[in-house]
Amino acid sequence: MKHKPTATFPAAKLLIRAFKRSAKLDRKMHSPTHALSWHLDVRGRFFGFDNWALFHHHITTLVPAQLHELTAKAESLSALAHFGQKESEVDEATAIEAMRDFVRRKFMPLIDFAPVDRESSTGYAWPGADLGWELWDQFTAQFADELIERVASALEAESGPWGLENYGRDEGE
């Protein structure tokens, strides 16, 4: 009977993220017609597994020494050209625009819709969104943390605090 680990090592999660970033970049730069799952399966097959799911599971069962060995092997392979590279290192302007678009689609500057409230921490009678957290949550697997923080700070400097216009309301209202 195979021993199932009770917890995944943090290094395994980082390694899985690196493989996912590599697949996303490969898809974007070389073959956007293939699904992301196809690019992930390629990585699994490259390491001797039938698909990404089996390779992913294997990574979660490795101990730190094995994780280190697998990481070193992945970094040395030319077939995984983008391994360990975040998208921001490839095209920073595109990354910035993607994050700005995400914020504009999901949030609005509070100044555009919320009444002023001088006692509030945001200065408005509406809760503000933590853009740094929202962007990090959405883009951490793709972009460098420093770039995410820089975009969040720039948006808040340009327009003040941002928030959800329909905060606390049902979708149907």
Image: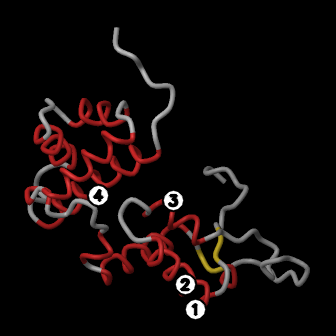
> What amino acid is labelled 2 in the image?
Leu
Q: Quadrant of the N terminus?
A: top left
Check whether the beta carbons of the residues at disc 3 and disc 1 lie within 8 A of each other. Answer: no
- Residue at the spot of label 3: 137
Task: Choose the circle earlier in sequence order: 2 or 4.
Answer: 4
With 44 as the anchor, is 98 left or right in this view? right
- Residue at the spot of label 2: 155
With 99 as the anchor, is 156 left or right in this view? right
Task: Choose the circle earlier in sequence order: 3 or 1.
Answer: 3
Which residue in the rendered view is the most extreme toward the top?
A: 1
Choose between 62 and 164: the one closer to the eye.
Answer: 62
Check whether the beta carbons of the residues at disc 1 and disc 4 lie within 8 A of each other. Answer: no
The structure residue drawn at horizontal position 23% and vertical position 53%, both measured from the top left corner, is: 72
Q: Secondary structure at mark 1?
A: helix
The structure residue drawn at horizontal position 29% and vertical position 70%, both measured from the top left corner, is: 87
- Residue at the spot of label 4: 21
